[in-house]
Amino acid sequence: MTPVFTLNGAETTLDCAPDTPLVTVLRETLCLTGTKLGCGIGRCGACMVLLDGAAVNACLLMAWQVTGREVVTIEGLRARPAAAPILAALAEANAFQCGYCAPGVVVTLAGLLTARPDAGDDDVLRALEGNLCRCTGYASILRGARAAAARLRAAA
Ligand code: FES
Ligand code: FES
């Protein structure tokens, strides 16, 4: 089976074993290294991508599972309307230090706030439960995430 899917708006055909993890395909075959590999077992959220609009762990998705579906990585997210307010709010909050967790956090927030621009603090906290950060202690990330949600609510 040759997986064919939409990646960042372009039809993409993969030449790999169907059980290759999507994160490996993105980083090693397609050179989309914005998607990070952390734990590799669905715990850290560094590998988040949007799958048909929902944030999912690319380390848990096999290549065959994206057949016919739409994947958006952090590289493709910039073309989305929700991206600019989220990136601006996180930057103003000095949300990140090393930045390794940043793509996953941004993708998670984009998935939540695109589907639910009215998401409140509790929704933001719940959505980010799967995104680990080893640097910041989370306060700055949550401050930026809340500000991003507030901006998108105001614009909705
Ligand atoms: S690398 Fe996928 S959740 Fe950690
Ligand atoms: S800023 Fe370093 S892991 Fe989050």
Image: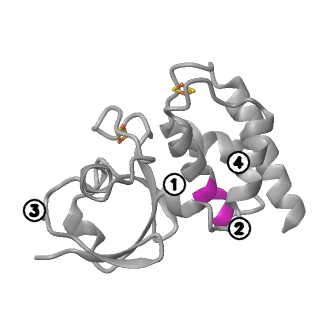
Marks 1 and 4 in Cβ contact (< 8 Å): no
| CA distance separating discs 3 and 1 | 24 Å
Task: Say if 123 sits above or below 73 in the image.
Answer: above
- The dot on residue 132 is none
Q: Position of residue 87 (x, y in %)?
A: 70, 48
Crowding at dot 2, Cα within 10 Å, few <14 / some 14-19 / many 20+, comes out as few
Q: Position of residue 117 (x, y in %)?
A: 75, 62
| CA distance separating discs 3 and 2 | 34 Å
- What residue span does the magenta drawing correspond to? 110-115
Q: Quadrant of the N terminus?
A: bottom left
Amino acid on which the number 3 mark rests in the picture: Ala
Q: Secondary structure at mark 2?
A: loop
Which corner quadrant of the image does residue 2 belong to?
A: bottom left
Marks 3 and 4 in Cβ contact (< 8 Å): no
Task: Say if 83 sits above or below 57 in the image.
Answer: below
The mark that comes first in sequence, 3 or 2, is 3
Amino acid on which the number 2 mark rests in the picture: Pro
Q: Which residue is mark 2?
A: 81
Q: Which residue is mark 3?
A: 17
